[in-house]
């Protein structure tokens, strides 16, 4: 009996749904699809004002799809990017960037060009990962903010773009440092030195350069390049006299002693090679 009632109930629901679908205007039809571009744009703006960004994006996307080349469609496309950006989250930020780039490609001469490029950069900057992770988004954001300065140097977004560039460069500098420190801790002083030296060259404005110099000196020391370690620690003293890293520097006497040992060993090896070449030369001459 229960099974029969259940089956009968399911059939009744199916009939209702089928009737609604065939009628062409029942509950299965998305009400957004009935709206014109202007109506959908207005509703999208209302949701934006209420900070209901996900709902807003649905209406704005519809407004654009209905009339992509109209003034309403153009405005809706840009606002759809704003809605996704405000909604936040990785997926929405990726979609926001896509909306902005679509606007940029469709309307390259728009008076909103500076804003669009600035928001592309922001959409990337919001996806920047920790310094010990992949930095591709950081590098792309840096390029986009530089484009803002290059293409729109007098825009209202230029100053903030400049500040964002500074912060992104600090982030990339920290990423380089963490890679170098990893190599150092893994017992790979040559790789660590290469990374720290590259950091100095690429990011001379890095705010924690005293930390870099200390670890560079330690990497030289671990690689038995004692004189270079001494020179680097001297730079730390001169360039960053108030740095707490100076207290961690090994005793200079030990470094100088080991540097002298290495220099003596090198001199002895060079003398031995010179004697060997001289002996071989005499033997060839006598023959």
Image (spheres, rainbow, N blue to C red):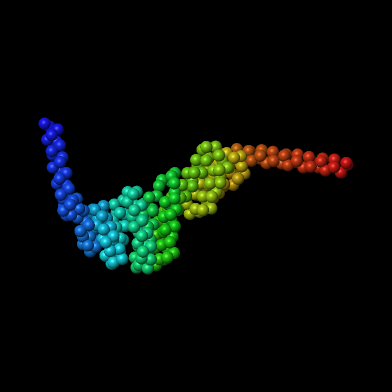
Can residue 233 be spotted in the picture?
no
Residue at x-position 36% and y-position 52%: 94
Quarter of the image for the C terminus: give it.
top right
To which quarter of the image does residue 260 belong?
Answer: top right
To which quarter of the image does residue 158 belong?
Answer: bottom left
Whether residue 128 sits left or right of residue 65 in the image: it is right
Q: Of residues 120 and 10, which is closer to you in this image? A: 10
Q: Of residues 258 and 153, which is closer to you in this image? A: 153
| Residue 238 image position (x, y, % from top left) | 54, 50
Q: Residue furthest top?
A: 1
Q: Is residue 65 above or below residue 206?
A: below
| Residue 163 image position (x, y, % from top left) | 40, 58
Residue at x-position 75% and y-position 39%: 272
Quarter of the image for the N terminus: give it.
top left
Q: Is residue 79 above or below residue 188?
A: below
Q: Of residues 240 and 188, which is closer to you in this image? A: 188
Q: Is residue 237 above or below residue 155?
A: above
| Residue 192 image position (x, y, % from top left) | 54, 43
Tell me how many marks there are: 0
Residue at x-position 49% and y-position 47%: 176
| Residue 154 image position (x, y, % from top left) | 39, 67
To which quarter of the image does residue 9 belong?
Answer: top left
Whether residue 247 sits left or right of residue 42 in the image: it is right
Q: Of residues 285 and 109, which is closer to you in this image? A: 109
Q: Residue furthest right?
A: 286
Residue at x-position 13% and y-position 42%: 12
Can residue 173 be spotted in the picture?
yes
């Amino acid at each position: 009996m229960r099974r029969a009632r259940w089956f009968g109930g399911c059939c009744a629901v199916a009939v209702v749904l089928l009737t609604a679908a065939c009628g062409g205007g029942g509950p299965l039809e998305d009400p957004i699809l009935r709206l014109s571009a202007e109506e959908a744009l207005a509703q999208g703006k209302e949701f934006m004002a209420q900070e209901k960004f996900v709902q807003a994006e649905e209406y704005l996307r519809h407004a654009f799809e209905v009339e992509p080349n109209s003034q309403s469609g153009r405005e809706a496309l840009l606002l759809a990017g704003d809605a996704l950006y405000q909604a936040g989250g990785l997926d929405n930020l990726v979609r926001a960037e896509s909306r902005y780039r679509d606007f940029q490609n469709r309307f390259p001469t728009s008076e909103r060009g500076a804003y669009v490029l600035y928001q592309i950069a922001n959409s990337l900057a919001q996806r920047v990962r920790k310094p010990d992770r992949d930095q591709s988004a950081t590098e792309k954001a840096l390029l986009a903010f530089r484009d803002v300065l290059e293409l729109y140097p007098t825009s209202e977004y230029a100053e903030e773009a400049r500040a964002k560039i500074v912060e992104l460069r600090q982030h990339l500098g920290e990423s380089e440092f963490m890679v170098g420190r990893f190599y150092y801790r893994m017992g790979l002083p040559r790789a660590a030195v290469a990374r720290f030296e590259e950091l100095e060259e690429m990011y001379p404005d890095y705010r924690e350069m005293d930390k870099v110099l200390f670890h560079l000196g330690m990497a030289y020391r671990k690689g038995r390049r004692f004189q270079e370690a001494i020179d680097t620690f001297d730079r730390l003293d001169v360039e960053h006299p108030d740095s707490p890293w100076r207290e961690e520097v090994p005793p200079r006497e030990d470094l100088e002693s080991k540097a002298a040992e290495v220099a003596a060993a090198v001199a002895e090896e060079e003398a031995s090679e010179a004697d060997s070449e001289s002996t071989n030369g005499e033997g060839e001459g006598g023959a």
